[in-house]
Amino acid sequence: MPVNKEELFKKLDGEGEDHVREELAAGHYGEKKIGLVREWLRKKDLSRENQQHSENLGATMSATKAAWLAAFAAVVSAVAAVIAITSSGE
């Protein structure tokens, strides 16, 4: 009898990734399930990698914004200094 992929994935979700990895390493999944279990684990790994990539991208965007703000503040300060210097000469 074929394994129902959706039901198996729900069961694996309930067991948790660490438990599933332990069970796989111990050889507790039969031939009919092992391919699907590995697929489920690959999806978990990919999801984690995508999450990490998103977090890294967010940090990069924040750093870029901070750099632009610092550059803008420097320009404003330079303009203010020039105005102050030219005004003090009058």
Image: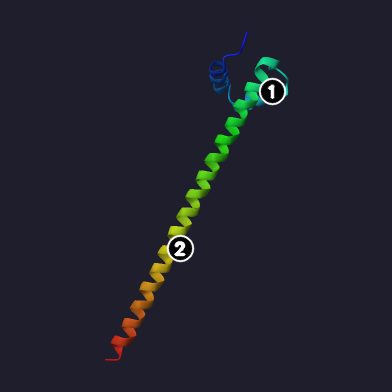
Horizontal placement of 35 versus 57: left or right?
Answer: right
Q: Where is residue 59 in the image (x, y as percent from the top left)?
A: 49, 51
Q: What residue type is labelled 2?
A: Ala
Q: Quadrant of residue 43?
A: top right
**SS class of the residue under badge 1?**
helix
Residue 7 visible (yes or no):
yes
Q: Quadrant of the N terminus?
A: top right
Q: Who is closer to the viewer here, 60 or 15?
A: 60
Q: Where is residue 50 in the image (x, y as percent from the top left)?
A: 54, 40
What residue is shown with label 1?
Answer: 24
Q: What residue type is labelled 1?
A: Leu
**SS class of the residue under badge 2?**
helix
Q: How crowded is mark 1: few (under 14 residues within 10 Å), some or many (20 or more)?
A: some
Q: How far is mark 1 from mark 2, CA to CA?
A: 47 Å
The residue furthest right is 26
The residue furthest bottom is 90
Q: Quadrant of the C terminus?
A: bottom left
Q: Which mark is residue 67?
A: 2
Q: How crowded is mark 2: few (under 14 residues within 10 Å), some or many (20 or more)?
A: few
Q: Who is closer to the viewer here, 84 or 79?
A: 79
Q: Where is residue 32 in the image (x, y as percent from the top left)?
A: 67, 15
Q: Residue drawn at (73%, 21%), measured in percent from left and top?
A: 26
Cβ atoms at labels 1 and 2 below 8 Å apart: no
Q: Residue drawn at (58%, 31%), measured in percent from left and top?
A: 44
Q: Position of residue 31 (x, y in %)?
A: 70, 16
Q: Residue drawn at (39%, 73%), measured in percent from left and top?
A: 75
Horizontal placement of 71 versus 90: left or right?
Answer: right
Q: Reading the chain from its start, which is encountered first: label 1 or label 2? A: 1
